[in-house]
Image: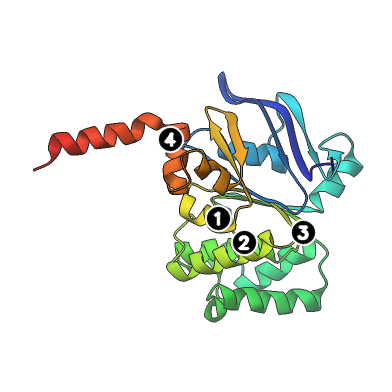
Amino acid sequence: MPTPMIRLANVTQYYGARPILRDLSLDVQAGELLAVMGPNGTGKSTLLQVAAGLLWPLEGYVEVAGLRRRSTAANELAIRQQVVYLPADAWLPGRSVVKEFLVAVGRVYGVDDRRLLAHADQLLTVFNLTEQAYTEIARLSTGQKKKVALCSAFIVETPILILDEPFSGGLDPSGIIALRKVLTHMAQRDDITALIATPVPELVEQFAEKVAVMHDGAITAVDTPAAIKARFGGDVSLEEALERVLEPQTLQHVDEYLETWKR
């Protein structure tokens, strides 16, 4: 079997005395777009931070492209050159001009300037930011800042993307459509691997090749959206299927509430 592009092996992570990840293992194959889903507070962001190297697990290890994180300085540098990580609430330099910031991020990853300038213009067009290209980031709206953050992740053209809740942060409908189409295109390519955390099942079903379901700091299922739905007859939505996997009592509680308070 081929070596996974991203591997988390028996990872345990605590915040203080509280366990966040519990002996968690997850493989993301090369060319795969995998979405991590689960209730709030179940450890999705922590999983992505461990995969991205921001957190070091108390137990277990992480491998990227066959290299173990923090095994040597050379290995860690090689990994970082291949990976871009975008947190849910990314920090942006407010005094920087939008296009100049995107070009600067690309230069960090060694992308050629001519390619950078052309790619920056294309991304700004895709996310309806052309008029803001020479505006300071601090003057943008919350949703526009989110779009700039997304552009900064795509402009580096790394083969591995780790994106935490890319659809959050005030994206408008056009931004959501643009991002969904970009991710759908990436899912069709075999040279891009993506690990994404998002709580929006109806969007995930359109672009994710696999879904990893998290609950209480552990992976409870990894499968295609269709296979997860098939567990419940295949005629349910992915949202309802996930609810039945994770919190089966929730639907019952909602029905009981509606029955109690109906007029």
Rounded to the nearest angstrom, the CA distance separating label 4 from label 1 is 25 Å
Q: Which mark is residue 183?
A: 2
Q: Which mark is residue 190?
A: 3
Q: Secondary structure at mark 3?
A: loop
Rounded to the nearest angstrom, the CA distance separating label 4 from label 3 is 32 Å
Q: Residues within 10 Å of mark 1 (few under 14, many from 20)?
A: many
Give amino acid for label 4. Arg
Q: Is residue 76 left or right of residue 20?
A: right
Q: Identify the mark nearer the N-term, 3 or 2.
A: 2
User: How far across and how far down the image is residue 66, in percent?
Assistant: 86, 41
Would you name the residue on which mark 4 appears? Answer: 244
User: How far across and how far down the image is residue 49, in percent?
Assistant: 65, 40
Give amino acid for label 2. Leu
How many numbered marks have been drawn onto this rendered protein structure? 4
Quadrant of the image occupied by residue 227? top right
Q: Is residue 63 left or right of residue 203?
A: right
Rounded to the nearest angstrom, the CA distance separating label 3 from label 2 is 13 Å
- Residue at figure coordinates x 65%, y 66% from the top left: 185
User: How far across and how far down the image is residue 142, in percent?
Assistant: 46, 62
Which callout, 4 or 2, points to the residue nearer the camera? 4
Residue sticking out furthest to the left: 263
Give amino acid for label 1. Pro
Rounded to the nearest angstrom, the CA distance separating label 2 from label 1 is 10 Å
Quadrant of the image occupied by residue 191? bottom right
Which callout, 3 or 2, points to the residue nearer the camera? 3
Depth check, front residue: 145 or 178: 178
Q: Secondary structure at mark 2?
A: helix
Would you name the residue on which mark 1 appears? Answer: 166
Q: Which mark is residue 92?
A: none
Q: Identify the mark nearer the N-term, 4 or 3.
A: 3
